[in-house]
Amino acid sequence: MQMVKAINSIKTSKFFYYWLPVFVYAGLIFYLSSLSTVPAQIIVTTKDWVLHMIEYAILSMLLLRAFGKSENTMLKFEKLKPESMTLKNWAAILAILIATIYGITDEIHQYFVPGRVMSGFDIVADFLGSIIAVVTIMVLSTKFLTKSKFKFSKVHFRR
């Protein structure tokens, strides 16, 4: 009985280790979107679309990390995966898709915040940031990190 509790405790702690950063970062995005005015020092030095790309590149990287390391989560999504696709590629698509959907909901949220506007260009920037980050990680993990501890776990990405 204690062995089962210990295993469940490990699974729970792994879930929080990989997914808590995703939720905290998504909460930070929501908070910043709730502000009527964005902090001036950020806007002065950078174009808005660049910030969106960076913001959603980070979110998609956190999502990819979480999907790549949490076996239970991927098993739940595996039923939706096309048969010809590897779990690694499916995790990448899910990371891009979820980050983009979150970007869309963020823009809808901004529509209701005084002083903020909803922008299709921001959604495109969110999507591009997600794609660039995930593709970069996938290429680097395939090309340069195959013998490194940073690659996707073989246990979690069978096939």
Image: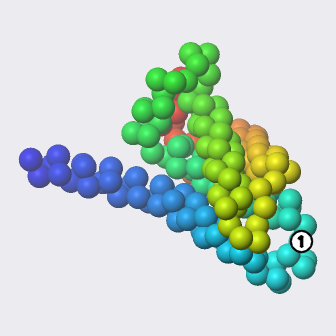
Q: How is the image coloured?
A: rainbow
| Residue tagged 1 | 46
Task: Return the x and y of residue 150 as percentages of the image width and height.
Answer: 60, 51
Point out the residue furthest to the bottom here.
41
Task: Return the x and y of residue 64 as percentages of the image width and height.
Answer: 60, 46
Point out the residue furthest to the top here.
83
Task: Return the x and y of residue 148 as percentages of the image width and height.
Answer: 62, 49
- For label 1, the crowd category at 10 Å Cα-Cα, with few meaning under 14, some 14 to 19 and many 20 or more, is few
Question: Would residue 135 be seen by someone viewing this image from the given angle?
Answer: yes
Q: Is residue 59 left or right of residue 39?
A: left
Q: Name the residue type under label 1.
A: Thr
On screen, residue 159 above or below 28: above
The residue at the point 90 percent across, 79 percent down is 44
Asked whether 80 or 145 is in front, the reply is: 80
The residue at the point 59 percent across, 25 percent down is 86
The residue at the point 60 percent across, 70 percent down is 31
Asked whether 106 or 45 is in front, the reply is: 106
Q: Is residue 131 left or right of residue 30?
A: right
Q: Secondary structure at mark 1?
A: loop
Q: Is residue 27 left or right of residue 45?
A: left
Asked whether 142 or 24 is in front, the reply is: 24
On screen, residue 138 above or below 45: above
